[in-house]
Image (cartoon, rainbow, N blue to C red):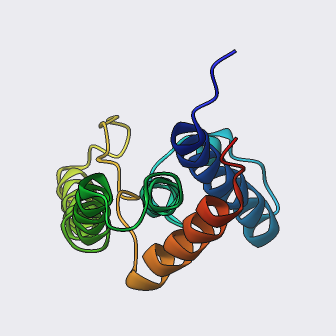
Amino acid sequence: MVYNPILCAAVFGWAAAQFIKFILHFVQNASFRLERLYGSGGMPSSHSSLVCAAFISTGRAEGWDSPIVAVMFVVAAIVMYDAANVRLEAGKHAKQLNEIMMRLLAQDGNTDTKIKEFKELLGHTPFQVVCGAVLGIVIGALIPLR
């Protein structure tokens, strides 16, 4: 059987973050929400955990002076910037659009009308990104290389 420590670290980083999201949602809301096992947004960032686990395990496996480590660092930086900025702002826009639609429907008296709401939980706060990154770094450092 083939064992790829970098891929294993990345997948485990993502899965660990998603499981933590699921548990945190349950603790905070006293309800199970299956979507938290695969959905985006929330605490911690699974995107950050995935790319940081891959970056650290790549460095360990290939050597820190390897060009692929530089590429992994750049990819991780882009993903984390996107999560904490672009996708976070998109989520804020979705929330505002949903509120506008509800007000417009209420003004027209269409309270029974069903609309498809935009998904609001898309991105992460900087703290959620940092927590995901730390989780990924720990996983990338601990995953066996062989």
Residue depicted at x 62% and y 57%: 17
* Horizontal and vertical percent position of residue 70: 25, 63
| Residue 42 relative to residue 23: left or right | left
Classify the position of the N terminus by image quarter.
top right
Viewer can see residue 43: no
Is residue 138 left or right of 101 when viewed as pictured? right
Q: Quadrant of residue 29?
A: bottom right
Q: Is residue 120 left or right of residue 71?
A: right
Residue for point 21% across, 70% down: 89
Q: For the point 39% across and 67% down, which residue is it?
A: 64
Is residue 70 something one can see in this rendering?
yes
**Residue 121 occupies quadrant:** bottom left
Front residue of this view, candidates 51 and 41: 51
Nearest the viewer among 9 and 35 is 9
Q: Residue at coordinates 50% horizontally, 45% vertically from top-left?
A: 39
Q: Quadrant of the C terminus?
A: top right
Could you say where residue 133 lies in the image, as x and y percent from the top left? 50, 72
Q: Is residue 128 above or below residue 23?
A: below
Q: Residue 68: where, in percent of width, then height?
A: 28, 52
Q: Nearer the viewer, residue 31 or 57?
A: 57
